[in-house]
Image (cartoon, grey):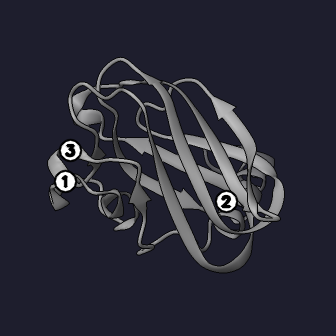
Amino acid sequence: RGLIHENDVEALKGFRAILDREFKTNLALKSKATASSYRGKSAKYAAVNTTDGRKDTYWATDDAVNTGSIEIPLGKTQTVKYIVVQEYIALGQRVKSWTAEIWKDGAWKQVGTATTIGYKRILKIEPEETDKIRINITDSKACPVISNIEVY
């Protein structure tokens, strides 16, 4: 017997199994994300950087723009339960508020709202069928810089 009780070890293994199951496949990976705008129309700051699987690329708006939207097509209708958003934290925490929407019955339906994002925010939603999602940055201290969006 080690320093951690067997019951705790089993509980941790169970928790790991849940995480592995729930976050197995990122439905947004390599998606052709688009944005309402991006800095200087430069590919270096385009929305596709949020779904490329890299942490060193990001979407950004122009300096004077503190809001914006990113739309992510999922390729086909799928069940969505979690939306993960990450800021490019090397440039600081900027987002003050944001919403998440899914495309349902020909219109956008809000499924979540939150305040800060920081390094990572996992938004758990009621399971919904959709073929695309939209992240709306509704307020930010400076131009938002989003490095990663994942959908599970």
SS at circle 2: helix
Based on the displayed image, in which of its 4 quarters is residue 144 positioned?
top left
| In this rendering, the label closer to the viewer, 2 or 1 | 1
- Neighbor class of circle 3 (other Cα within 10 Å; few <14, some 14-19, many 20+) is some
Q: Is residue 37 left or right of residue 23?
A: left
Q: Nearer the viewer, mark 2 or mark 3?
A: 3
**Amino acid under label 1?**
Lys
Whether the residues at callouts 1 and 3 have beta carbons within 8 Å, the answer is yes
Image disc number at residue 39 = 3
Residue displayed at 28% across by 50% down: 58
Instruction: Determine the residue positioned at 77% across, 48% down.
Output: 125
The structure residue drawn at horizontal position 71% and vertical position 64%, both measured from the top left corner, is: 22
Residue 24 circle label: none
Question: What residue does disc 1 label?
Answer: 41
Task: Tell me the distance, in whole angstroms, between the alpha carbons under discs 2 and 3.
Answer: 35 Å
Q: Quadrant of the C terminus?
A: bottom right
Query: In the rendered image, is residue 72 in sight?
Result: yes
Q: Label 3 amino acid?
A: Arg
Q: CA distance from mark 2 to mark 1?
A: 37 Å
Label 3: state its secondary structure.
helix
Kind of element beneath mark 1: helix
Residue pointed to by mark 2: 19
Asked whether the residues under the numbered discs 2 and 1 touch, taking CB atoms below 8 Å apart as contact, a structural biologist would say no
For mark 1, does the 10 Å Cα neighbourhood hold few (<14), some (14 to 19), or many (20 or more) residues?
few
Q: Position of residue 74 (x, y in %)?
A: 59, 74
Q: Amino acid at mark 2?
A: Leu
Asked if the residue at tag 3 contacts the one at tag 2, i.e. Cβ–Cβ closer than 8 Å, the answer is no
